[in-house]
Structure formats: structure tokens, C-alpha cells
């Protein structure tokens, strides 16, 4: 069962693989497992639904219930509290949760740029990050990008005291910008850009990466106890999600069909499929990284993870937080087995170039 709002009909997509891979031996069909998304059903996490539709879960003896999320911070907390068996969480919030000593563990990195940033109307007088001083910015406190707003502001030379933050619900975030209730919003580009385009709202985007804040995006996570006690199941869940992510890269239109069958609300609204296509393409553009191309889907560069951890500890973690050891919270144990060929990656670079340009 998937809990959705009207906004979920404005986005979609992710990835798939042409032929099934051998599945780990899961002895019998499992009772329903609970997987939480970091946000609404949309392109950045559609592989969770595609895995259901294409049978990637069922072939491995898995029955997975996918539930919408309320931000990566909230998803990490819910996973740690045992409300879910598995979760898809942004790398930054996941590291932050570990620094707060929550029991979260990453099993595979799906995409490699969180697309955190500042969304603006196209006619906004704000041209640079420094121009945000004196302005009102809308933000969802439990979102993936909001904890790193102070880090972006510091690196971009923004006087935080001059900025007014207006906290709001994720269902009205983009609308508040379109209706000029705020001057800008903190956002995940792969989520917000399709919503803005769906409402014919011309926009611009200033990525946090422009100030040197580079974070991996979605990580397939569980709790250490789940991995220890149900290793075959955890492996099967990871493989199924990555299989779906690869299929979506190879066959994006079929992937959209599958996603819409699983989440019919996406196809009901005018332009819903186009917005799903945009959301899918934006997420997939962030998969064009050396980690996946050279090593296979799900692979994590531990040196880059260490650098992200440094950023989290400097800018996002409480003063008394303990720096989590990289090898204690992320591994490549289940990563790298699902691969695209060199020719397939070359084709993806061409196909996805326009989506990468949208992210600034």
C-alpha cells in the first residue's frame, strides 16, 4: 500500500534491467517487509515501485510494501525506530543520523548527487547566493537539504542572520514560491524542478554544489540488526532495487509505464507522464558517475564518503556528536554486481545531457 498526495501525481521514474539476475536464495516467501521512501512517489525513487511491477521482489521471495516519506531526516528516524525494515535515505541525512547514534546502515548508493539547492522563480532578482540576504526562504525542516542550508550559507558568504526561514509542509513548498509567498525555497532539484514545470512556472536553480557541498543522493539502508539477522533478505532487497534501477536506465519509457501502473495517480493529471519523465531523467543524470560506470550500480567511493562525513560533522551535526566510522555505516558488500556496458553508458550520457543541464 502506498500513501500518496495530489502532488505525487506530478513526478516519477527511475531505472531497470533488461534480464533478471540470479537471486540470492531466500528460502520462502517473506511476510510483508516495509520500505519507506525519503519523499513522495517520484522519479528519484520510482525503482522501488518498478521492482514490484517487474517482479524483482517476488522472484526473490519478497513481499515489499512501499510507503511515502516525509524527508530523509524523518525516514532515517523511522527506520532507526523500527517502523520500517528498509529505507531509501539521502547520504547526508543518513550520516547525520549515524552521528546522532541512530542505528542506520547503508548497503548501496543508487545515485551520486543529492541535487540540493535553492529554487527561484525565473524573474527573481536573486542572481547569486549572496543575493539571498534579506530575503524570505521557504523550507521543509525534515527534508534532506535543509540541515545543510547553514553550511551552504557559510560557504557562499551569506549572512544567516539576515535571512528569514519560513518553515512549511512539503505539500505547499513549490506553490509558496510560485505564489510569491517566499523569495526562494531550499529544495531537492530532482523533486522540485518537475513540479515547477508542471505548473508552467519558469524557474532557476542554484545548487549547493556551487559552494562545494557535494553529497551522494539516495542510499538503500537498513538497521545493523536486520543485516546481521537477515543477511540473505537484505541482499535480495538490495539486488531487486538495483535491478529495477538498471532496467529504468535501459528502457525509460517502459519504466514509466510500470511506475504509472503501480501509482495510477501519476497518470491521472494532465501532463503527469511528462512530469514523471522529467523526474526520472533528473535522477538518472546523477547516476552518470565513475563509481557506477567503473564498478557497477550501488558502488560507493569510500574516500568521497569520508569527505561527506567531514562536511556533516562540520556543518550539520551537534557539537557533541560522534563522527561515525565510514566502514561502520556503509559498505560495498552487495554493490557492483549489476552493470551496464560501456556502450550503454555512452548512450546514457547523450540521452541524459539535457536533464543534467537543468540542475545547473
Image (spheres, rainbow, N blue to C red):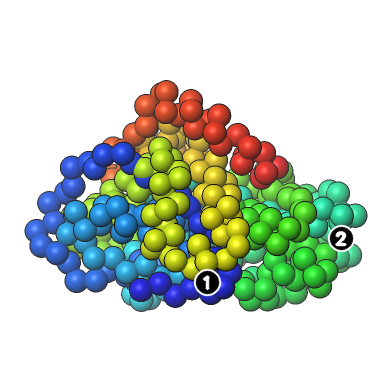
> Which residue sits at x=40%, y=46%?
254
**Mark 1 residue crowding within 10 angstroms, few (<14) / some (14–19) / many (20+):** many
Element under label 2? loop
From the viewer's side, name the closer residue of 345 and 92.
Answer: 345
1 or 2: mark nearer the eye: 1
- The tag on residue 308 is none
> Which residue sits at x=37%, y=41%?
246
Looking at the figure, which quarter contains the N terminus? Answer: bottom left
Q: Position of residue 164 (x, y in %)?
A: 81, 71
Element under label 1? loop
Looking at the figure, which quarter contains the C terminus? Answer: top right
Residue 348 appears left or right of 56? right
**Mark 2 residue crowding within 10 angstroms, few (<14) / some (14–19) / many (20+):** some
Report whether residue 254 is seen: yes
Q: Position of residue 261 (x, y in %)?
A: 39, 61
- Number of labelled discs? 2
In 3D space, how far apart are the residues under numbered discs 1 and 2 (Cα atoms)? 28 Å
Residue 222 appears left or right of 276? left
**Within the image, what quadrant is residue 20 found in?**
top left
> In the figure, 78 relative to 214: above or below?
below
- The tag on residue 133 is 2
- Label 1: which residue? 70
Q: Are marks 1 and 2 in contact (CB under 8 Å)?
A: no
From the viewer's side, name the closer residue of 184 and 12.
Answer: 12
> Which residue sits at x=36%, y=43%?
247
Q: Which comes sooner in the sequence, label 1 or label 2? A: 1
Q: Position of residue 273 (x, y in %)?
A: 54, 55
Residue 230 appears left or right of 247? left
Residue 353 appears left or right of 62? right
Q: Position of residue 216 (x, y in %)?
A: 52, 47
Amino acid at each position: 500500500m502506498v500513501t500518496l498526495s495530489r502532488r505525487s501525481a506530478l513526478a516519477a521514474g527511475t531505472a531497470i534491467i533488461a534480464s533478471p539476475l540470479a537471486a540470492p536464495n531466500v528460502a520462502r516467501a517473506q511476510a510483508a517487509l516495509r520500505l519507506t521512501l525519503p519523499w513522495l512517489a517520484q522519479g528519484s525513487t520510482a525503482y522501488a515501485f518498478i521492482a514490484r511491477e517487474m517482479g524483482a521482489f517476488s522472484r526473490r521471495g519478497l513481499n515489499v510494501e512501499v510507503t511515502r516519506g516525509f524527508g530523509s531526516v524523518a525516514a532515517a528516524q523511522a527506520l532507526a525506530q523500527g517502523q520500517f525494515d528498509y529505507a531509501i535515505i539521502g547520504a547526508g541525512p543518513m550520516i547525520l543520523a549515524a552521528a546522532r547514534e541512530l542505528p542506520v546502515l547503508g548497503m548501496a548508493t543508487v545515485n551520486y548527487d543529492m541535487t540540493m539547492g535553492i529554487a527561484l522563480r525565473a524573474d527573481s532578482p536573486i542572481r547569486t547566493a549572496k543575493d539571498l540576504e534579506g530575503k524570505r526562504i521557504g523550507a521543509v525542516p525534515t527534508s534532506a537539504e535543509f540541515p545543510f542550508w547553514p553550511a551552504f550559507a557559510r560557504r557562499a558568504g551569506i549572512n544567516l542572520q539576515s535571512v528569514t526561514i519560513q518553515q512549511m509542509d512539503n505539500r505547499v513548498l513549490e506553490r509558496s514560491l510560485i505564489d510569491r509567498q517566499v523569495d526562494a525555497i531550499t529544495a531537492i532539484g530532482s523533486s522540485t524542478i518537475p513540479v515547477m514545470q508542471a505548473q508552467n512556472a519558469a524557474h532557476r536553480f542554484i545548487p549547493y554544489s556551487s559552494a562545494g557541498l557535494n553529497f551522494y543522493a539516495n542510499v538503500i539502508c537498513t538497521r545493523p540488526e536486520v543485516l546481521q539477522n537477515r543477511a540473505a533478505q537484505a541482499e535480495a532487497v538490495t539486488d531487486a532495487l538495483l535491478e529495477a534501477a538498471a532496467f529504468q536506465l535501459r528502457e525509460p519509457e517502459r519504466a514509466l509505464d510500470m511506475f504509472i501502473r503501480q501509482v495510477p495517480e501519476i497518470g491521472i493529471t494532465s501532463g503527469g507522464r511528462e512530469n514523471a519523465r522529467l523526474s526520472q531523467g533528473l535522477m538518472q543524470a546523477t547516476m552518470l558517475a565513475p563509481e557506477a560506470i567503473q564498478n557497477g550500480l550501488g558502488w560507493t567511493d569510500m574516500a568521497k564518503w569520508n569527505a561527506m562525513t567531514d562536511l556533516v560533522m562540520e556543518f550539520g551535526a551537534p557539537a557533541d556528536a560522534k563522527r561515525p566510522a565510514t566502514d561502520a555505516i556503509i559498505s560495498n558488500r552487495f554493490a557492483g554486481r549489476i552493470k551496464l556496458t560501456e556502450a550503454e553508458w555512452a548512450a546514457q550520457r547523450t540521452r541524459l545531457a539535457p536533464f543534467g543541464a537543468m540542475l545547473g
